[in-house]
Image (spheres, helix red, strand yellow):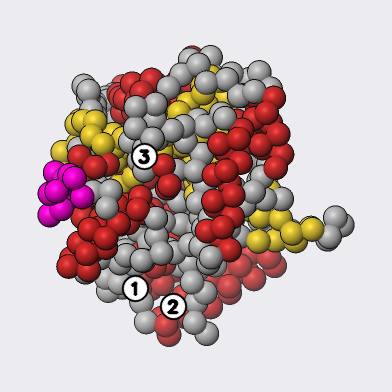
Amino acid sequence: MSEQKNNASQEQKQPGGVELQDLAEQVRVRFEKLHRIREREKVPFKNGFEPRNLASELHRGFDEKSKEELESLLVQASVAGRIMAIRNFGKAAFLQLQDRSGKIQVFVQKNKLGDEEFAKYRDMDVGDIVFASGVLFKTKTNELSIDLDQLTLLTKSLQPLPEKFHGLTDVEIRYRQRYVDLIMNESTRDTFRKRSKIIEEMRKFFVEHDFLEVETPMMHPIAGGATARPFITHHNTLDMQLFLRIAPELYLKRLVVGGLDRVFEINRNFRNEGISIKHNPEFTMLEFYQAYATYEDLMDFTEKLFQRVAERVIGSTTLQYQGTAIELGGKWQRISVEDAILKYSAFKDRSQLRNREALLAYGKEQGLPMNPKDSTGGLMMVIFDEQVEKHLVQPTFVTHYPLDVSPLSRQSDQDPFVVDRFELYIYGREMANAFSELNDPEDQRARFLDQVNAKNAGNEEACDMDEDYVTALEYGLPPTAGQGIGIDRMVMLFTDSPSIRDVILFPQMRPVAR
């Protein structure tokens, strides 16, 4: 099959991919070319070619120059990247190269490269990685290009790229083969650049506020720090069961006990739970603790953090998410759990909000998934989760959670039924969880025992007793407030991504059926 015919077959592919027989034929032809290259050259996969330029730098520096100016300047340029398109004209061709910064066109001529080098070009395909150098010029259509005097194949691509006009549109393949998604889709590359920038700006913000970045264990002897089902592993040498961490909270607060008054950590958490557009079993959290602060201080701090990141990353505190304008500027709504239930659900009798029988009757009437064994606060949170969350579109701090669903939070001085806690909701999704920390060791021990009893009764998400953490509290934890922020969900918001899988490079997937 000739090069022209092979390229034409790629150009004529229908949207959505190619027939398997066509794909197999293209792969066969590429392997034949690789074998030909091996016979001709000692090293078919080359190294040691470092480009002087990036595509974006060349465009910035010379797009505004006229043809005549470029001809007089005789600018030498060299780039390296992947061939994304080929237009053949017999003894000449235009190639579109893509590097990490963008794309640039290069011009190949037989009479300039010579017969031998032009023959090598004939074994190149869309997807190959090449080094190219020559002189900048403008085409008749005024497109900046490089007139090549050298074109070297660095890496042969043996798998054809998806059809270029429609890119990689199959969502399942995009997640499973992120490397192809990144090659084909600029929007995907932009999402992960923004993710990196968001994390960079968060780090800067915390360092500027005198926080110390730390690292705590990823494998815990006791599952704790949150209510979630853990992943279990085994350490052979110590012959002991360990848990992949569900949260770093208890270790970070140990550091505050030790005198590190402001600490933060950005790292992975693991929860053996469902997979959805909002959940991945492995996810990234930012968690921080500040001594001599309250949960109310953290609400102000969180507003400033999100506003700072928005201004630095997208240039505005107003953003669009799934067709809805989200305003991050100014002061955000603050509302208690109970007030939110009364405002957004059909439960309107405040006097019955803490009545278990009234809550169970309402749940049965509304068809809510209530468990009669749940605590009063647990029943209340079912109403909140099922009927209230979806209404919290603009940034909202939901405060004063029931004590019986907040085992690590400080009890309110004014109302012993609730704790000094908030969760941040945006677009109906929990973005952050924070509270004034419980620092009374006797109270903490009692709450751990309640969790142990709940676990023995069948609650797989309940915490275990952590004696060492209670001992740490007995040395004295200063008044402290702490918070966890879901970075993946934050990136979803800032990149207008509908699914958490869109913002995790390699999300967890079911095995492909064989």
Residue 17 circle label: 1
**Residues rendered magenta in the picture:** 342-352
Q: Nearer the viewer, mark 1 or mark 3?
A: 3
| Contact check, label 1 and label 2, Cβ < 8 Å | yes
What's the CA distance linking mark 3 and mark 2? Answer: 65 Å
Counting from the top left corner in percent of width and height, residue 28 is at 53, 78
- How far apart marks 1 and 2 lie (CA) works out to 9 Å
Q: Nearer the viewer, residue 196 or 159?
A: 196
State if disc 2 and disc 3 touch (CB < 8 Å). no
> Which of pointers 3 and 2 indicates the residue nearer the eye?
3
How many other residues sit within 10 Å of disc 3, few (<14), some (14-19) or many (≥20)?
some
Identify the residue at image location x=30%, y=67%.
Answer: 369
> Which amino acid, mark 3?
Phe
**Residue at position x 63%, y 64% from top?**
37
Return the residue at label 2: 23
Residue 417 image label: 3
Helix, strand, or loop for circle 1?
Answer: loop
The mark that comes first in sequence, 3 or 2, is 2
